[in-house]
Amino acid sequence: MTGVRGPVGLEELYAEHYRSLVRLAALLVDDVGTCEELVQDAFVGVLRRRSAWDDPARAAAYLRSAVLNGARSALRKRRVRERPVPAPVRSGEADDNRHVLAALRSLPDRQREVLAMRYWLDLSEADIASTLGISAGSVKTHASRGLAALERVLEEER
Amino acid sequence: MNVEDRLRDAMRARAAEVEPGDRLDAIGTRLDAAPSRRWRRPAFVALAAAAVIAVLVGALVIVNRDDGGRDVRTVDDAPHVDLAQPAEAIWPLKSGGTRYDTAEAAAVGFARDYLGLSSADLRNGDAAVSPVRVEVAGMVVVVEQLRGERGWWVTGSTADGVRVARPIAGETVGPGKVAVAGCAEGSGGPVRMEVRGDGVDAPLGQGESLSSSCDFAADLAGHYPAVGHGAVVAWARDRKAATVVRVSFEPRAQPLEAMWPIAATAVRFDTPAAAAESFAKDYLHIAEPGAAGTPVEVGDATQVPISRMTVHVRRLTAEAGWWVTGSEADDITVEKPEAGGSYTPDEEVAGCAGVAAVGIGLQYDGSPAFGLGGIQTQNCVYHGLPADQRPHPVAPAGAVVVAAVDDQLRPLRATVVRVRIPPSAPRLTGAELAEVAWPPTGFDRPYDTAAQAATQFALDVLGFRAVAGDPVVRRISDVKATVTVRPTDGGPETRVSTVRVDGRGWLATGADADGLVIEQPTAAGAVDVNGPATVNGCSVSAVPPTLAIRDDAPNASPLAEQALGAEPDCRVTATVTLGRRPSTRYGTVVLTLEDPLHQVVQAAAVRIAFTAGAPAATTTTTIAAGPPADALAEVSATEPEVAAERWAATVAGDEVLRVVAHRPVGELPGAMEEVDLRQPYGGPVTTVTVRRSGDQWWAVAATTPNLLVDEPASMADVATPIHVTGRSQAFEAQIVLQVVQRGQVISETAAMGGSSELQPFSTDVAVPKATPGRATLLVLTRSAKDGSVAEVTAVPITFR
């Protein structure tokens, strides 16, 4: 009778999103341990938020949003604590990839997040807009500016 | 490999390195261990509220912090309602995620979950055509489908025998109390009344009427939200049903002392540092403001150092939290205007700055982010006008911002002065000023300098017998100057306003003097040649002034002249009838003070247009209310330029195209205007035509000379694919065609026209998602600099 969809199971939600969200966070925050904590916090949040928990699509959007907020917060606190943040260097990672990721992490929050969702999660503009709470036009703008800035940073490093 | 491919590769490589362990148990453990976070809800809602209000008022009021942030929290002594809720709907809560497929289900859910009735008994339901009235649990529940929202929504209910006369549905209530009145039949106990806020469990205000008669009334005192919606609930005497009326809470006005946070949002700051940090980041838009330093108490106020500024914050009576009242950059002082004083946007801002250039801006309360106009300093001194040159003040208060800026005019730190902005006469663009300025168009005496124009204006129009010495010229901007003239050396001063128009040199636009001013008619105002003209002003002189109305015919006597009597205070009023018809289109209203020999020694003047128009009331009644049929989007405003900006914001996202000029068009005064918009850093101009309907202005067309659409015609009936032809000139010849329907971009296509000159383009735009009804075709270009929308042409269309 009602249009309410039944609550999705935790296992189902976990299986579908946990790994990809940790990897999303890892694009924004270098420390994988922190990333896992962020994502676990997001799951705890969605479980406590009954309204988000009821709807699988809404739960996924909530998780994405919570992870992005958590990553932003972690980066901000880290910037305050230990500025400047050195670019992470890992063995086995190709130089170009390392430069690209470092450049990505140097972008403003919104640009970085839009690019991560667009090129890692392959989300539509509408989904990105919904996750970030901005308009689709703004998503385009941030993506365009982010790519341009990324290109500029990479050019400068040559 | 392009940058997108490189980015994808880098992401894949990074993701391949990250292999999370199985942490499902860890989540369960954290869930059990975590303390209840129910206290966080108000803060979360408040931050969401800030974001929503930012959109509503067009302001960039984003408090970019999560609820676990270091020290920024909203203060919880004021209730915060869920601003995501549609204005019309009481139930379900939009943020709750619940949606109902049928009206009956919505009504039952409302009775059970909103009103808490234990046995919501569905008895009847009408046909599923919105709105539906559903009988449930002794109530008739009104359930509707809302535009843009999925499912069915409860918009009100009426219990058997309980009528609420006040408030009426949709009424704005508060702020301190809500008056509820009505009639409840039957017996069984007092009538209980509640005021509820969206998403707030406990009533915000409540009371009972003990009267045994049908009538009930009470003023429900409460601490109601600064903004948002809720409902008034009047219970039946047996408490088994309720009449529920949707209401809005009255937005709280901005305190006169403080510019931040915006009072009409739910955002408040519980520490001085939090207020200062948000002020730097969200009000001034400083890119990296850093963390605030240690606050220092100075009397009632607290000073917070941040980003080479001292931000002044304090608590306000009757307001929660800490409020920003101003700031001082280490190396910028503002001498004009004074903090707390009155300021009009055409006044110079002046002071001293230890930087090569400053940006000067004016931020109206609740307006979009301000622009900064760059001004060079000379030996520390700067003076100039703020970038915002709107013709009408849009708020009664705001702040003047003088900022140290980077090479792209982005603020680094700023001295910010709180000011009152009195309502003023409409301000005119340069072109409009030139139209009514003196000498008139076609007059064969352009003046090379402002001083020449002012001197001749004083002699020919103000009635000076002579102008002594060299007039003092004060340049206000590249195109404006004030010239001080005197009839004799050491005589009283009259300031003549002048404007420079390319190709015509300098023109005079009016005059005033200390203690002598004309308030009505306003600059470029109208004087009806058929009716009496009313002139108001102020003169502090002991000598009564003389009023004259002149046309621009050389050496002609005034059309009307009258010696005015003394009135209380400084008031000067006169109603005069023109003695003859003017022989020119424009003229001047002049107030003069004369010496005992009847020589003009001081004067005030405004330039006016002579009209023989119909009474204003006739004009008003010809304008219908509601959106025009060709409105480009469902956005409107009470000011034409604001309507244009709002429409542009729907196209360009949050990248604001700013007003650079506007002008009336068409035969009917006050019915239609053209507003020129441009990006803050320049670029092509988009002209938006706005039309008034009722008290609102709506965008009905947008054009740019670089994007011309020949087909489809405006308001054409179309089907997918739409054949679009025209001519364009754009960077790398690239143009974008979008189709917008109900606020959503439902199709986007790229096309190519000309790059260095207008060249034809032709393309078919497939719109598979189109539904019958109105839509808008947008042809736009994006900025090569940052990808934002640079210019746009819009064509209203209708899908068959």
Image: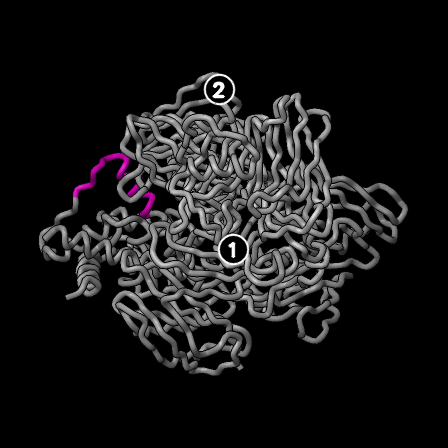
Report which residue position mark 2 lands on: B490
The dominant secondary structure in magenta is: helix
Q: Is residue B724 left or right of residue B103?
A: left
Q: Is residue A77 magenta?
A: yes
Q: How many marks?
A: 2
Compare residues B589 and B761 and report the one nearer the observer. B589
Compare residues A142 and A36 and report the one nearer the observer. A142
Q: Is residue B791 left or right of residue B796?
A: left
Q: Is residue B710 magenta?
A: no
Whether residue A14 is visible, yes or no, is no
Work out whether B374 lies above or below B321.
below
Residue located 61% across and 27% down the image:
B593
Q: Secondary structure at mark 1?
A: strand
Q: Is residue B191 left or right of residue B604?
A: right
Q: Which mark is residue A158?
A: none
Q: Which chain does the residue under circle 1 lie in?
A: B
Residue located 38% across and 69% down the image:
B707
Rate crowding at label 1 as few (under 14), some (14 to 19) or many (20 or more) other CA atoms within 10 Å: some
Residue B509 percent across, percent down from the top left: 51, 42
Quadrant for residue A11, please give it: bottom left
Residue B764 percent across, percent down from the top left: 38, 81
Work out whether B581 lies above or below B496.
below
- Outermost residue toward the right in this view: B213
Residue located 40% across and 29% down the image:
B350
- The residue range painted magenta reads A71-86
Report which residue position mark 1 lands on: B663
Residue A138 percent across, percent down from the top left: 38, 57
Compare residues B252 and B526 and report the one nearer the observer. B526
2 or 1: tag closer to the N-terminus? 2
3D distance between C-alphas at marks 2 and 1: 41 Å
